[in-house]
Amino acid sequence: METIAAIATPNGIGAISIVRISGDNALEIAKKLTKKEFTPRKATLAKVFDSNDELIDIALVIYFKAPSSFTGEDVVEFQCHGGVVVSRLILEEVLKHGARLANPGEFTKRAFLNGKIDASQAEAIAKLIETRSKEGAKLLSRQLEGDLSKFVDEVREKLIEIMAYAEVFIDYAEEDLPETLGSEIEERLQKIEELLIHTLESSKRREALLSGYKVAIVGKPNVGKSSILNALLNKQRAIVSDIAGTTRDTIEEDIQIGSHLIRIIDTAGIRAAKDEIEKIGVERSKKAIEEADIVVGVFSADEFTKEDEEILELLKNVDKEVIIVINKVDKGINIDLDKFQGLKVVKISAKKDISPLIDELKNLLDSFSSEDEHILISTRQIHAVEKALNAINESKQFLQTGELELFSYQIQDAIRAISEITKPFEYDEMLDKMFGSFCVGK
């Protein structure tokens, strides 16, 4: 297989940059650049030269002999000094000696094709780079170890057992078989269906565990939304004034709450818009509520107006986690808190102390953790489970009518569908789509 190469570290200035080579000629190329011999899996300090025998850098070079490498091929890594120049010069020399530039995800694709990892582990690698929470990183690390693969194998084995039971009915229909055999098949099938439904619903519900949770701050104008944003960021990101409607558009920033990196969105005040620009801002605020995982509804402690009533009614009817913030409590509370009964309520003064809100956000984000659950991490995996569930649902009618050949056929479809998570059958199209989303060097 042809030799590929890429810079495996981000662009920019840093202590170390890594140039990775994989393929049949990886070791020979490394020898030509360094004039050294290498022992597998041992870091060797080596001078790296260009084609004119001029020194490029002094780097650590590590040789991983096939098949004991990430890709299953000969792999060499140059750990050179960081920056924007040195690693590029080394890569240019590697390419001059016969390697070609790797495509996005090609290293991981080769690891998959060479049986070093399965499809679920490959997708976990890509997601691990992008995840925005500690819990997400823990989940993906477990998937790298094969946690999801084991789950798929268990479901697959259970479906194979059910198909074997059905085959007993078909092959020995004239024999005296236990009367409970049919009910046993149905019971086993029901348990698998419940397990897959739970996994599917949990995965959809906790999708933001990997991509990062969105928190929208909403309320009428001049209740302190921008002051809360600024306090969370510990900087003056949004303009704050006593003039209602100062924030005309949504403002988005990333912030760390506990172990979670979240995107917090300060929205324009929700009210009857006075002009076209403000109308657009209000519509964007409502859209932010739809897209958010958590909605922070802000109300002033000194008054509760008709606009507040409408916003509260809106928040009571959204299918989201909602935190009610009563702001400006340093001036006293002159509103009826019973209006917020049944909702999480925190009382703060954004200009003095917002720690009660931070604590509530942290507790809520921590509750989203799912260490004991199997989570599907891609649209492809979710689609595979949905196909398996459809096949199982279709099989039930054939089991009830005694059409066991058709029942068995549907169970085979379910087995094929669930197997796609780890070892898909339609290789070429799936591989190009899946690995094409990886960064170069992975």
Image: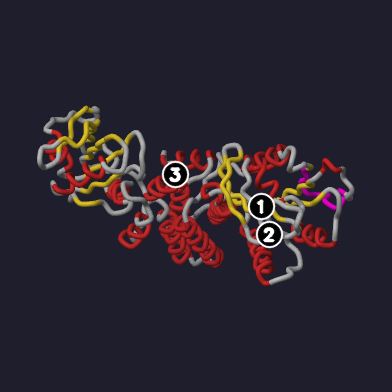
Q: 235 or 369, which lies in front?
A: 235
Residue 239, numbered circle: 1
Q: Is residue 426 magenta?
A: no
Q: Find the distance from the CA under tag 2 to the CA under tag 1.
A: 12 Å
Q: Mark 2 or mark 1: which comes first in sequence? A: 1
Q: Is residue 90 left or right of residue 410?
A: left
Q: Which residue lies at the image location 23% right of the left edge and 40% below the top edge?
A: 75
Residue identified by numbered label 2: 268
Start-end of magenta stretch: 337-346
Q: Crowding near pointer 1: few (<14 within 10 Å), some, many (20+)? A: few
Residue identified by numbered label 3: 128
- Secondary structure beneath label 2: loop
The amino acid pointed to by label 2 is Ala
The amino acid pointed to by label 3 is Leu
The amino acid pointed to by label 1 is Ile
Q: Crowding near pointer 2: few (<14 within 10 Å), some, many (20+)? A: many
Q: 103 or 234, which lies in front?
A: 234
Q: In this view of the protein, can residue 180 be seen by the observer?
A: no
- Secondary structure beneath label 1: loop
Residue 369 in the image: state x and y as whole percent: 59, 41
Q: Quadrant of residue 275?
A: bottom right
Q: In this view of the protein, can residue 335 be seen by the observer?
A: yes
